[in-house]
Amino acid sequence: MIPMSYARAADAEDAVRRGAAAGARYLGGGTNLVDLMRETIERPEVLVDVTGLSSEIEETKGGGILIGAAARNTAVAESRAVRERYPMLARAIVAGASPQIRNMATVGGNLLQRTRCIYFYDEQGSRCNKRDPGQGCDAIDGLNRNHAILGASSACVATHPSDMCVALAALDAVVHLRSADGERALPLTELHLLPSEHPEIETVLEPGELITAIELPAIPFAARSSYRKVRDRASYAFALVSVAAALEVEDGTVRDVRLALGGVATKPWRAWKAEETLKGRPATADSFRAAAEAELAAAAPLRDNAFKIELARRTITAVLGELTGLEA
Ligand SMILES: Cc1cc2nc3c(=O)[nH]c(=O)nc-3n(C[C@H](O)[C@H](O)[C@H](O)COP(=O)(O)OP(=O)(O)OC[C@H]3O[C@@H](n4cnc5c(N)ncnc54)[C@H](O)[C@@H]3O)c2cc1C
Ligand code: SF4
């Protein structure tokens, strides 16, 4: 038996005070952390339940939305403001997990869920640098059909599993944080780290730092946005490739675009190169394909996952086509 204490945080200040203890971890819906505790991959000594903190979804002065980190995934997907102004986010959430899991899972927990690499979970039989730093990575020469083609290193090739984070990356979401040292905010695209030589360090968070909220800035053209997830089964499966996109077209020309990819990279992947390629070009299938090519030029496939390059190209082209009414 592994001894452990549990406390429910009264407010953010209380959470941060308790979260500063050695071996402390925040507990959201527990849909990922508790699974990892059962497998003894995570062994917290203190669980600080943060589900009683802010779950409000409110308007900001700048015309955006602030979502409390304790908001359940279902509540965010069903929010009228989210569905009308950021439909890609509602679609991304609904594409994930199951209704029961989405009812439990929180926004804060979704951001920090860990990879679904099968070797990461196989504590008894497999080598994994993310689980046991310096041990080696059995995925690189193993079964790697689901692994990353972008952002990987010689130490780790695992994908980031979140659907919600892909939409948040595309939407320029800002993560609000609190610790004993005060508050700070950073773009979601800067929260997760590439694996490099240290895949066990997954984010820029300091020990005990609490996610308090996610802020979505006003992006009027995001009202015309979409999320498409390609996977092995219609439900209850993680993405092989996913695309979150918003497109602003004027007189047949792409004025602005937001594009992010899931299922293909070691972190939620903002497709900056594709966006740059697309801006100012005609909104045609040829331009969309050229943008996809630009983003995927850096792809480094493994033995089993080269198919993801063409699948990502086609999915990017199809989603952008759907947004311009070009898709059949
Ligand atoms: C069967 C199954 C299928 C799934 N399929 C999908 C899928 O298709 N797509 C998808 O995106 N996800 C999927 N998920 C993952 C699911 O979305 C995550 O488990 C969930 O979002 C985690 O949220 P949680 O609140 O339960 O987090 P928890 O499990 O409570 O916590 C996860 C991590 O976040 C930390 N944490 C929680 N809240 C905070 C906070 N406020 N500040 C700082 N740290 C915090 C915890 O310490 C822990 O490290 C699936 C899960 C399961 C079990
Ligand atoms: S890909 Fe990453 S998570 Fe998977 S076994 Fe290798 S080091 Fe571990």
Image: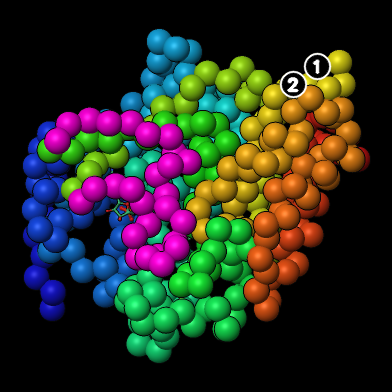
The label on residue 286 is none
Q: Is residue 129 left or right of residue 88?
A: left
Seen in the picture, residue 7 relative to 127 is either above or below; the reply is above
- The residue beneath circle 1 is 250
Q: How crowded is mark 1: few (under 14 residues within 10 Å), some or many (20 or more)?
A: few
Q: Marks 1 and 2: CB-CB under 8 Å? A: yes
Residue farthest toward the top in the current orientation of the protein: 61
Q: Can residue 148 be seen in this view?
A: yes
Residue at point 20%, 51% (across, down): 207
Residue nearer the viewer, 308 or 135: 135
Residue at point 13%, 78% (across, down): 1
Give the residue type at disc 1: Glu
Q: Is residue 227 visible?
A: no
Magenta region, main secondary structure: loop
Label 2 residue SS? strand
Residue nearer the viewer, 150 or 81: 150
Q: Residues under labels 1 and 2: Cα distance?
A: 6 Å
Residue nearer the viewer, 165 or 299: 299
- The residue beneath circle 2 is 255
Residue at point 42%, 31% (across, down): 174
Q: What stretch is highlighted in magenta?
A: 181-207
Q: In this view, does 270 lie to the left or right of 285?
A: left
Residue at point 22%, 30% (across, down): 183
Label 1 residue SS? strand
Q: Which quadrant is the C terminus positioned in? A: top right
x and y percent of residue 204 in the render? 33, 48
Disc nearer the start of the sequence (1/2)? 1
The colour scheme applied to this rendered structure is: rainbow
Give the residue type at disc 2: Arg
Seen in the picture, residue 126 relative to 13 is either above or below; the reply is below
Q: Residue 203 lies in magenta, yes or no?
A: yes
